[in-house]
Image (cartoon, grey):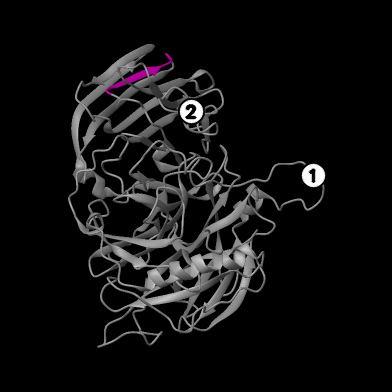
Amino acid sequence: MQLPYSLLLLLLCCLACQDRPVNESQTKTNMSYTEQHRPQFHFTPPEKWMNDPNGMVFYEGEYHLFYQYYPDGTVWGPMHWGHAISTDLLHWEHLPIALYPDSLGYIFSGSAVVDWNNTSGFGVDGQPPLISIFTYHDMEGERQKTETFQSQAIAYSNDKGRTWTKYEGNPVISNPGIRDFRDPKVIWDEDSAQWVMVFAAGDHVMLYGSQNMKDWTFLSDFGREWGSHGGVWECPDLFPITIEDTGEEKWVLLLSINPGGPNGGSATQYFVGDFDGKAFTLDPSFIEALGPIDQGESEEPEKAIWLDYGRDNYAGVTWSDIPKADGRRIFIGWMSNWDYAREVPTEKWRSAMTLPRTLSLENTAQGPRLFQAVVSEVEGLTKEIKAFSFDQLNGEEVLTESKKSATSQWRIQLQATVADLESAALEIKLVNDLGEEYKIGLDGKTNRFYSDRTKAGKISFSEKFAVGKHWADRQGQNQQLEIDLIIDRSSAELLADQGAVALTDLFFPTADFTKIMLSASSNVTNIKGKIYEVTGVW
């Protein structure tokens, strides 16, 4: 007999409210994750399904990473908030599930902050509470085809995020009749002395303000006429950042979209502008680069500035409450794509996060743009195994080769001079004994970087996974080439031109890659670089 859907949801919620036994895999540290394709120095869940990073906050020496989690399967299901903590952004301790579904719905994406001044009144004994802000998703409401099945809610913790109490007055923002109404990101704005919440509302974002985290007032909206709208807007993040060389403060709005990415499926675009305590307005350089969307019948493609051109960096947001003495704006993304996330060839677990990255804003010829670098903590995992130098390399060279298993954990840093960009070519290739290969490089003729996983192993699990090269536009015609490439068994993260360009891709070789090869055209000179092994963290 099949139970009615509403009864199934009620049973789920009852189970969620009980104290479930903690799965040993959620608390055990220093685990040896030996499954094929399991990254060794990227965050992965101990088991089962994971997607968006949530609730990232720093408090009393701990980086908290919550994430969309389904503990009962390796495909998307009733969403919980999984939880892990770290003192260095790399070595993670898995903690028990933080938030369970209840009678108001599943626990969708959101954020977390430290309420330093106890504006919410949830603090005890003079200690500031942690506040999580999330979307409730009422599956029964969606099933009944209402437009109000998503709302914003809060919970609080007084024990450093170990346990959470949902606010009895939830939801704190009810749905006004917008189908996709989700993913709140909250920040305290010093200038306007208020909490500011930004969340996705279909084809735009909405901004709300509050003094106490409980009572919210609409401020403004943004985005209907700007950027790419090839899919639903999701997972926004709004934060101030200082331009590196001038000290001028700007605000950045990150915005994920699915589908509509530059190489298909999921991706993240961003906007730079100003925020006056009520409205976000675009920087003139973005107005010029994007141009407003033509509301008529024009077939001109919508324009976007992409945070990452690869197919596998989505829903990323930044940590809140990083100490001023540190000063970094630290980002992490979900390393997958909704085109094939449910079908990737892993069994015990599904999905990983990107490495944490530091975002900086720098002036370019096009205006202020984001640059990215993996966090400096990664250097503590690396050991140099090869230095190389070529005045000229007109052909292919084996840089390093190993017959050890599970050896494809590398960081490759390379610099070169491009004499004639129009005919320049440079390529790094990873190869295994089965003849499978992953290629990444520069095509000077188009002035673009590329990633090619079409022959990198398992591709038959999805017809959308390996449909051709993925391309990433360079920002200018710079003849000085700089590449930072990080390989972790089943992923590549390229940060090129000092971090101006990012390209993140997954691949699934049948056997680990054991050989790194380099080729370049004759007009690419003064090639210098180093290869490092990267130690696993599990």
Mark 2 or 1: in front is 2
Residue at point 66% right, 55% down?
A: 226
Label 2 sits on residue:
460
Q: Residue furthest top?
A: 395
**Spatial distance from mark 2 to mark 1, Cα to Cα?**
37 Å
Residue 252 visible at all: no
Q: Are marks 2 and 1 in contact (CB under 8 Å)?
A: no
Label 1 SS = loop
Residue 279 visible at all: yes
Q: Which residues are magenta?
A: 514-522
> How far across and how far down the image is residue 455, in percent?
44, 22
Q: Is residue 233 above or below residue 504?
A: below
Sort mark 2 into few (<14), some (14-19) or many (20+) by Cα contacts within 10 Å. Answer: few
Residue at point 21% right, 27% down?
A: 405
Q: Is 517 colored magenta in this rendering?
A: yes
Label 1 sits on residue:
298
Q: Nearer the viewer, residue 280 or 86?
A: 86
Label 2 SS = loop
Label number found at residue 470:
none
Write down the quadrant of residue 301 in the picture. Answer: top right
- Judged left or right of residue 129, residue 235 is right
Q: Is residue 366 above or below residue 418?
A: below
- Judged left or right of residue 483, residue 213 is right
> How far across and how far down the image is residue 95, in percent?
26, 62
> How far across and how far down the image is residue 272, in percent?
54, 57
Question: Disc 2 residue type?
Answer: Ser
Q: Is residue 495 above or below residue 463?
A: below
Residue at point 25% right, 88% down?
A: 125
- Judged left or right of residue 25, residue 206 is right
Write down the quadrant of residue 154 in the picture. Answer: bottom left
Q: Residue furthest front?
A: 1
Q: Is 238 colored magenta in this rendering?
A: no
